[in-house]
Amino acid sequence: MNDTNTMTVRTPWHLWVVGVLSLLWNAYGGWDFIQTTTRGETYMREVGFDQPMIDYFNAMPTWMYGPWVLGVWGAVIGSILLLVRRKWAVHAFALSFLGALVSLIYGKFISPPPPPSPGMEVMVWMPFVILLIAAALLWYAWSMAKKGVLR
């Protein structure tokens, strides 16, 4: 205890590991977002999308950019807030989770994409992986806030 009768909570070592890994993972999502929205088809071809997938992506309704932005940039901001130990990380990761959930629902139930091209079969599972990681980061930030690690 210090002089003001408040407890000082030490930052656990795993916060730095989770924070850095989270920032690296989510920074890639941000880079992918920027490349996809600025270079479009050129970038999509470079990462292995075939023409039916590019056409599917280009036909995505404008409103789907909202969940995409929340998912990607909420996660990037959440990662930064986690590293600087701010409670707002919980809110940012919650928005990211919401964006990932809406994106998954859209892509799996409302407007499923065409079958992936050879070599891209793993992309069928990527929305579930992204949602799982978003949920884990939300839970982690919430638990760190609950323990008083985040201010």
Image (spheres, grey):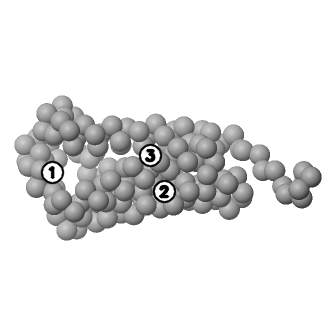
Q: In the shown orientation, is residue 137 left or right of residue 63? A: right
Q: Which mark is residue 57?
A: 1
Q: Position of residue 129 (x, y in %)?
A: 38, 51
Q: Amino acid at mark 2?
A: Ala
C-alpha separation, residue under disc 2 versus residue under disc 1: 26 Å
Q: Give the residue type that dot 1 points to.
A: Phe
Q: Are marks 3 and 2 in contact (CB under 8 Å)?
A: no
Identify which residue, 90 or 21, lies in the foreground: 90
Q: Position of residue 25 (x, y in %)?
A: 43, 40
Disc 1 vs disc 3: Cβ atoms closer than 8 Å? no
- Indicate the amino acid at tag 3: Val
Q: Position of residue 104 (x, y in %)?
A: 30, 61
Q: Secondary structure at mark 1?
A: helix
Identify the mark at residue 76; answer none if there is no mark: 3
Residue most toward the bottom? 110
Q: Residue furthest top?
A: 46
Q: Which residue is mark 2?
A: 92
Tell which tag, 1 or 3, sits nearer the viewer. 3
Above or below 83: residue 111: below
